[in-house]
Image: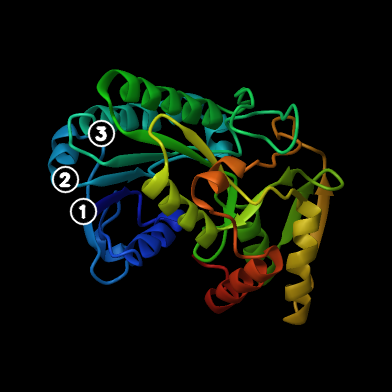
Amino acid sequence: MRCCVIGGAGFLGSHLVSALRSTGRDVLVIGRSDRDAVALPPGVAYLQGDIQNRVFIGGALQGVDELVDLAYSSVPKTSFENPVQDIVDNLPGSVALFDVASGLNLRKMVFVSSGGTVYGEALQLPVAETHPTNPISPYGITKLALEKYAQVYHRMRQLPVLCVRPSNPYGERQKPYVGQGFIATAMASMLSGQEIRVFGQQGTVRDYIYVEDVAQALVCALDQGLPGESYNIGSSIGRSNLEVLNEISRVALASGIQPKIMHVEPRSFDVAANILDVEKLRLLCGWQPKTGFAEGIARTWAWYGRNRGRP
């Protein structure tokens, strides 16, 4: 089985590639970076190119049985700064990918959306896949638009695509200071002696899940997910920024590091709480998170400590 992961050299993608290799799959990674700058497991092929180039992507996907689309060039913070660029950088390329993929003989395609942004303010918690989708960020709007395009290509062109909605992954190799990944930025800040800002007294409540558990959920969706469906991926446990910092502080203090935390005014564009219901995926294939939060934080802290906060 040959599986192509677009964006497979990034934080989540690199963990997914390892999980796919452990199943015996032949894995191809497509990315924008030069191959020399990309560290991938032995035996994984890499192609540098732009998915908006239909000739390139059409040729690259010949002989591929499965496809996972992780490519996305912005984060919620940058989407607010330039919402038009968020559309231009992300929408045309992924729609073109759906179009090219619908002409191939794929067994399955997985589009990775965002459970943290497509729902908007929660009407009830935890949030199931049937919850209304009313995103309040340009990032979430574009992700939801791509989900809708995926559904169109599934219905009109029989593209065997499904969508997954991860909550807030964290773990080794996540980049800090990019406007996404609170845990990565908090750890890098502690290690470099910088202050960590919490918006409000407690901060927002999010559903944090260890990256290796997300990778296994993606493999489950690829193996058994039903085309046309959407699946949440999360822990179903909500933690405030302050609760997260308390857990990180425990391991930081054990390392002789005193965290510096500063409370500032809440931001109007932050959803107060996002916690995902993952029963649909559990019933599908028995998946559930295996890594407890304390264990995941300890592993992640050890990695950042060895790398001094650098991805």
Residue at image point 39% right, 24% down: 151
Q: Position of residue 173 (x, y in %)?
A: 49, 64
The answer to whether the residue labelled 1 contacts the one labelled 2, judged by CB atoms less than 8 Å apart, is yes
The amino acid type, in three-letter code, at marker 2 is Ala
Q: Is residue 94 visible?
A: yes
Tell me if mark 3 has few (under 14), some (14-19) or many (20+) residues whose alpha carbon lies within 10 angstroms of its own.
some
Whether residue 30 appears in this view of the structure is: no
Q: Is residue 263 above or below residue 51?
A: below
Residue hosting label 3:
52
Q: Residue at the spot x=23%, y=69% of the render?
A: 43
Going 36% across and 20% down the picture, which residue do you hit? 152
Residue 146: give x, y in percent of width and height: 42, 27
Residue under circle 1? 47
Q: Is residue 154 left or right of residue 249?
A: left
> Circle 2: is it few (<14), some (14-19), or many (20+) Cα within 10 Å?
some
| Separation of residues labelled 1 and 2 (CA atoms) | 8 Å
Q: What residue sits right under mark 2 in the picture?
A: 60
Query: What's the CA distance linking mark 3 and mark 1?
Result: 14 Å
Give the residue displayed 75% in from the left and 58% down from the top.
244
Q: Nearer the viewer, mark 2 or mark 3?
A: 2
The type of residue carrying mark 1 is Leu
Indicate the position of residue 263 as horizontal and vertical percent values.
Answer: 83, 49
- Secondary structure of the residue carrying tag 3 is loop
Mark toward the start of the polypeptide (2 vs 3): 3
Q: Residues within 10 Å of mark 1 (few under 14, many from 20)?
A: some
Q: 187 or 62, which is in the foreground?
A: 62
> Vertical placement of 251 versus 124: above or below?
below
In the image, which is nearer the foreground, mark 1 or mark 2?
A: 2
